[in-house]
Amino acid sequence: MTAAPILKLEHLGVTFPNHPVFSDLNLTIRQGEFWSIVGKNGVGKTTLMRTVLHQLRPTHGQVAYLPNANEVKIGYVPQFRNIDADYPLTMRDFVGLNLTGWKWPWLSRKEREKVQTILTRTGLEAIANRPIGQASGGEKQKAYLAQALVEAPNLLILDESTASLDPVTKTELLDLVIELNKSLHLTVLFVTHDIPMARKYSSQYLMLTPNGAEQGPIGGLTQEKVWEGENV
Amino acid sequence: MFSYEFMRNAFAAGTIIAIICGIMGVFVIARNMSFLTHTLSEIGFSGAAFGVFAGWAPLNGMLLFTVVSSVIVGQLSARSERREAATSAISALFIGMGILFLSLANKNASYATSILFGSVIGISAGDVQQMLWLSLLVLLVVFVIYRFLKFDSFDHTGARVKGLWTNALSVTFLVLLALSVSVAAQIVGSLLIFILLTLPAATAKYFAHTVGGMMVLAIVLALVGVWSGLTLSYVTNYPVSFFIAAIEAVFYFIALGWQKLQTAE
Ligand SMILES: Nc1ncnc2c1ncn2[C@@H]1O[C@H](COP(=O)(O)OP(=O)(O)OP(=O)(O)O)[C@@H](O)[C@H]1O
Ligand SMILES: [Mg+2]
């Protein structure tokens, strides 16, 4: 039996002034699936993610959350973020920022426990009280992931979040994501240029090319195919 | 010194101002709004001058001008690229208007000086009360929207992703800032207001690494500056804003030096 759909893209198209990025994209993403989004630089992966997040209004078609938008809680780790060396907050405080709502200014005990749990799971426990501005690129990426996960999302979007990580850390993080994917049916959209990683972790892929998109079970994705896509 | 009513009023006002500036300052620094704060204080000068011209209390003129212009500035330059140039133009316009209003009002130069540089003796018990109400309003709103404001100020990208209404937050914050500027200008003057709204928080950033910690430290630094500034001014008869400016600047440079030492080792 197939799982219930969580996200449906219907005839989706985005055109920047004089510059079509993609068009007529149809895609159904079901609960618990792990999608890799691949394609060469500038083909529109980030644009697609931002459209999914309703940060960009599509030129054609629509993005629908199922059964409805209230049921879908998104965690997003964007490709770029400006945290400079001067940035004062600790890892712990930064992760806690995502706990919003009409609540007291300070975090409740339960909320502090949530933060602690996710810091432990992402391996940030030891440096939790260090300013994030002084952390390494990889440690920052972990903190971004931890922040996205702290509210227990059911759809996680990673935009090249592992690009700056060393192979061991990369595997650690994706192991965590796949564990949440398996145990909690967390749906994952993973934008990446790393085809072996995509093959190792995902169940499906979506490849964007300037001439259209291709999708299917991950077995159908090969490095050659992505290179060919680049040559079109 | 506390036997004089005006000194008691000045200390009460100074304490309120220090608390407001410590809290708002942390957000001003996180949102990179020092420059805009400076502009708002110049607009405040213009508003006070207009108040004098129209026969109102200067604070009311200030409130009118800063609140209206904060909304306009927010619309005009929500994103940072255009912000500096646009705000420079606006501030030039407002300073010019302030000078015009003062000259139309036929007030002497000492009136202008006290608006620009603040004064200790001019604060009545009624003023203190109005400042208290305005400050409580600011604090209440910050309290209610605290988690959203904190997220948006310290991680704008994350807050947008979360779907927080960041534009509404930004305008709300600007209005709160306008109120704070008007309140704080009563004692340090509109020219030096940004000192209390930026320096204590900028200093605190080097020593505290949680939002709450930064606020507490910024309040303490602002209180130390305001209290000692008032005392020194009382004793020496030199202007209070000079002392406050000097003290806060020294704190800031100490923090910078400390930071240098930390990173050098
Ligand atoms: N706001 C915008 N206005 C105009 N054009 C844009 C805008 N954002 C992106 N583009 C263009 O849309 C195209 C797709 O950009 P996008 O960032 O989605 O690529 P990407 O697939 O994520 O690339 P990368 O692998 O480098 O991250 C690019 O040609 C880019 O220049
Ligand atoms: Mg991208």
Image: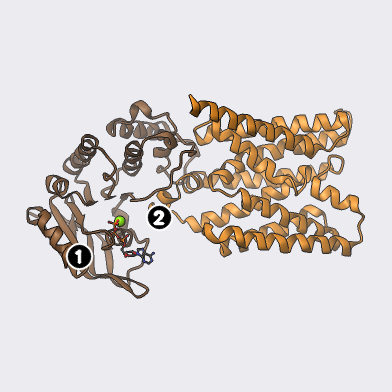
Chain colours: A brown, B orange
> Residue B51 location, x and y as percent?
81, 59
**Crowding near the residue tagged with mark 1, few <14, some 14–19, many ≥20 C-alpha atoms within 10 Å:** many
Query: Residue tagged by mark 1?
Result: A209
> Residue A214 location, x and y as percent?
14, 64
Residue A217 visible here = no
Q: Which amino acid does the dot numbered 2 rest on? A: Gly
> Disc 2 sits on a residue from what chain?
B
Q: Which mark is residue B163?
A: 2
Q: Which amino acid does the dot numbered 1 rest on? A: Thr
> Residue B31 location, x and y as percent?
54, 48
Horizontal placement of B251 versus B52: left or right? left
Relative depth, front residue between B242 and B136 = B242
Report how far apart the C-alphas of labels 1 and 2 lie in the structure. 29 Å
Residue found 61% across the figure and 42% down from its top: B25
Determine the image quadrant of residue A201: top left
Horizontal placement of A129 versus B100: left or right? left
Does dot 2 land on a helix, a strand or a loop? loop
